Structure formats: structure tokens, C-alpha cells
Amino acid sequence: MIKGCCTPSRSETVKQTIAPKPAPRSASDFLHESVEITGGTALVGTNNPLVADDGEGPLRKTQIKPFRLGRTCVTNRSFADFVQATSYVTEAERFGWSFVFWSQVPAHIQTDGIPGLEWWRKVEGAYWRDPDGSTTDIIEAAPEDPVVHVSWNDAVAYAAWAGGRLPTEAEWEHAARGGLGDVPFPWGAREPDDSGHFPCNIWQGVFPKSNTGGDGYVGLAPAKSFQPNGFGLYNIVGNNWEWTAEPFKIKSLKKSVKTKLSQMQGFKLLKGGSALCHKSYCYRYRIAARTGNSPDSTTSYQGFRVVWDIA
């Protein structure tokens, strides 16, 4: 297992797994769950990078075509439809365990943690339908919560079944900005805080020991919660990390970055941060923020949303 700030990785060597290829449904079946995102000039990154060595900068422009994007992350309800239709088995189920944040783990379960990141626990039996791995006292995943404990491979399989794909980083950032241009957050420039401004689901309090839940949640929020951005997208930052289509790459000549990337061969890019993010610890609920994880890794705060191309 590799240490990671918000997304611990399953292994040092990326396991190559062969995912089933279920027959796809028509993309038209999902249009009511999506919004159209205008194409044109998209902004990516920032000229004010705030997490060293993550590759946040510089701000750059690129051209993209219009596309449709899920209004929310894929929910447990939608993922259950996929599983029922295809008999798909996720990687967390095949491995037999997944990473769960310490406060979610039932007291009676014995777990292993990552040295130095003990708040992440390796929980036998945790997967998308049983997020805390309680096994004998199963708490079914809330239908309208975002599906989590899904790997990049799982997300690609679902997206293909839904007639879509995962977003590129440029598409994701363009959509997250909601038409506001060069802003740090989907709602603009005002920083979330611990006392009164709660535009998204992140950590309030002292990480990792105490979360006051000032925003109304101490764990995941429903996929459709808080105010949507200018394009009508919910929870595109905070709540849960979102897989993208791209490899995790950083353009840098720094020795420290090269060393970091040498340990992340084959990793995929995640965007958006999660409910565990706080400015004092993981300041990655900003649009330009980014991280990577191996495509077989799963945690209780990793999900995804789907892109559909417009002909």
C-alpha cells in the first residue's frame, strides 16, 4: 500500500485486471440525468498553485467540443441498475476489501491502517453496497448517495454501459467553473470556512479527529445536495473525488516530483476533493486541484460522473 493524502492506493504495483464488457445501453436513456456543457475555450489549471508538486499550474487554454455531463455523480441507485443488468462485480469485491475512513468503521471490526495515515483503514468486506464493511450488520448504501468504493476500471465499465465515458481534465474543469472563468471554486472566489459559509461538503473542525459537521454532513452527502453551479452541476467539488479519463501526469523538472511520479506509474487523475478535505490538511476542493491513484484502488470517498459526446 502507498501513502496518499486523500486517496490511499491499493498497491505499489498496479494490478492489471480484466473487467467485463457488458452490452451498452443507449446514451439517450441518461439524458435526463445530464446537462449540456458549452464548448469553446476552456481554462485548465491556475497561476496561483497552492499545493506544491501537484501540477496545478500554470493556467492554460484549450479548445473543447460541447458535451453532456452527469448532473450529479453516479448514484448507488444507478450503479445498482448497472449491476443488476450486467452482473458486474467490482474490484473491491474481487479483492475482498477496500479503504474506509476510520470514523466510519464499526467498533467491532478489526482493521489495518497505513503507517502515518492511520485514519485510512483496510476493511475486509467493504464495497459499494456495504460502504463500512459491517458484514453481519449491513447498512445498505443510501440510494441517492454517490456510489463509492469504485475503481477507475469500475467507472470505465459503467460509463461504457451507459453509452458514455469519463471526462478529460479540461472538460471537468470547464464544467466545474460553471461559466465563471478563472475562479478557484464552482461558486466563485469566496472561501468555505468552519463557521458560516458552507457551499460544499468538506471537513469542518480539526482533521482527522473531529468534524463538527457544520455543513450538515460528517460523511457523504446525497449526490444532489447544496446549490448547483452555473451549469447546473451538483457537488462537483467536495463530497467525493471523481475519476477522470486521464493518466496522472505532472510537467516538472524537480527531483522531488520525478521521485513522486516514479511511484505512481499507471495512476489515473482524480478531481474535486472530498468531504475529508480541509484547508489545513488537503486543500484540494479547488477546481485546479488534482491527485492520482492506481486504477484498481477504491475508497469510501471515490466516485465518478459520466460524459456523453454530442454528435
Image (cartoon, grey):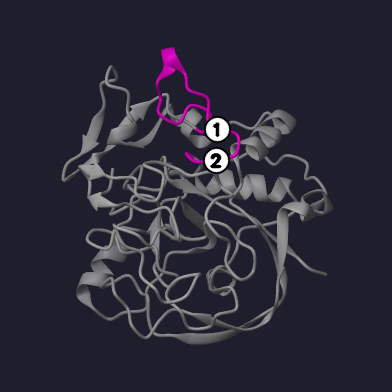
The answer to whether 68 is drawn above or below residue 58 in the figure is above
The amino acid type found where label 1 is placed reads Ala
Label 1 environment density (alpha carbons within 10 Å; few <14, some 14–19, many ≥20) = some
Q: Quadrant of the N terminus?
A: top left
Residue, far top? 136
Cα–Cα gap, marks 2 and 1: 5 Å
Residue 141 falls within the magenta-colored stretch: yes
The amino acid type found where label 2 is placed reads Asp
Q: Pointer 2: what residue?
A: 145
Cβ atoms under marks 2 and 1 closer than 8 Å: yes
Q: Classify mark 2: helix, strand or loop.
A: loop
| Residue drawn where x is 36% and y is 74% of the image | 55
Which SS type dominates the magenta stretch? loop
Residue, far left? 116
Q: Classify mark 1: helix, strand or loop.
A: loop
Question: Residue 120 lies in what quarter of the image?
Answer: top left
The reply, left or right, for residue 97 in relation to residue 281 is right
* Image position, residue 215 (x, y; %): 39, 51
| Residue drawn where x is 52% and y is 60% of the image | 236
The reply, left or right, for residue 165 in relation to residue 237 is right
* Image position, residue 285 (x, y; %): 39, 63
* Image position, residue 75 (x, y; %): 60, 42
* Image position, residue 243 (x, y; %): 51, 55
| Residue drawn where x is 33% and y is 55% of the image | 277
| Residue drawn where x is 42% and y is 12% of the image | 136
Q: Pointer 1: what residue?
A: 142
Range of magenta residues: 128-149
Question: Residue 134 lies in what quarter of the image?
Answer: top left
233, 38: nearer the viewer? 233
Give the number of the disc on residue 273: none
